Amino acid sequence: MSLTERPRRLRTSQAMRNLVAETTVVPSQLILPTFIKEGLAEPKPVKGLPGVFQQTRESLLAQVDEAIAAGLGGIMLFGIPANRDEQGTESCNPNGVLNQAVAAVRERAGDKLVVVADLCLDEFTSHGHCGVLDGRGRVDNDATLALYARMAVELAKAGAHMLGASGMMDGQVQVVREALDAAGFTDVSVLAYSAKYASAFYGPFRDAVESELEGDRRTYQQDPRNFTESMREVRLDVEQGADIVMVKPALSYLDVIRETAQSVDVPVAAYIVSGEMAMIELAAEHGLIERERAILEAVASVRRAGANVICTYWALELAQMFYARKTL
Ligand code: PBG
């Protein structure tokens, strides 16, 4: 055959493949989500997510040290309070589990790691919704915003560098930005969960935070069938001052990541969620797929789609792989 082009020539060795690889993942682009539970005596494994635990304050700080040593970009904190109520009161308590954890983590990490705090009510409400309910049991957007504003200021006071606005209330980025600025926290950044879908892939996470949600979040999180709606959500969040916009979940929404990356001038993040991780872990456990290769392929796909920042429970392990292989 006389062929001018033989694409296979660039696949002849590992060195050649590394040389021409279009996608790289480095530890500084990764954020490790983690859970701290109030009153826990020792770390407790989360079902379906090997290596993921509900942490005690002590084990959380050990994880912070590991994250710094591994060169991770950030750590993202979710708190599980001992007491929940209708209004999610503990979210705004400076002595509450999340605010205290943020303070401890920030003290330990200084500026060596970006400390991200989840800004949402779902871990704090007895009904498990991301906002407060009105008289008819519906999630009340604007009443919730007032609480997000207060929670944002408390988290900033505790020392968070960045707030993950994950509740999918309309106007949340604007309200949080205004509250932070008014309190003098102009440097605290907002990671907007802009395109967050009502996904079945959050299953293991709901166990991890012991969610008491009945029903679903379809009146505020997005319908998985929609794409254009995400572009609208992203546009609104950028207009409202989002510093980073996020797409979540990641693996089933690579098209959304791609288009978002092409249409905004802020960094784009994506969250490989609990159920996406569990699918790979369980398939690997059953010998159906090669675990490491599958993880690397999944993470590469998210980067390839255009995410500069990736939230993943595999962050520490990925960093170890990176140092062992000198590439990801
Ligand atoms: C809600 C929140 C969720 C996740 C992160 N923040 C789930 C939900 O909407 O119930 C899911 C993360 C995961 O599945 O890994 N504040």
Image: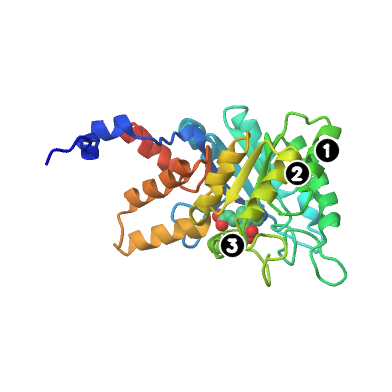
**How far from the left and from the top, in percent, is residue 18?**
30, 33
* Amino acid type of the residue that numbered disc 1 sits on in the rendered structure: Glu
* Amino acid type of the residue that numbered disc 3 sits on in the rendered structure: Pro
Circle 3 sits on which residue? 224
As drawn, 184 above or below 164? above
Please name the residue shown 66% across and 55% down the image: 229
In terms of secondary structure, where does tag 2 sit?
helix
**How far from the left and from the top, in percent, is residue 31?**
54, 40
**In terms of sequence position, does the residue under pointer 1 or pointer 3 come before the other?**
1
Badge 2: residue crowd in 10 Å (few <14, some 14–19, many ≥20)? many
**How far from the left and from the top, in percent, is residue 66?**
48, 36
Quadrant housing residue 186: top right
Q: Nearer the viewer, residue 64 or 164?
A: 164
Please name the residue shown 46% across and 34% down the image: 27
* Amino acid type of the residue that numbered disc 2 sits on in the rendered structure: Val
Disc 1 versus disc 2: distance between alpha carbons?
8 Å
In terms of secondary structure, where does tag 1 sit?
helix
Disc 1 versus disc 3: distance between alpha carbons?
30 Å
Circle 2 sits on which residue? 173
Q: Is residue 66 left or right of residue 151?
A: left
**In terms of sequence position, does the residue under pointer 3 or pointer 2 come before the other?**
2
Please name the residue shown 61% across and 58% down the image: 197
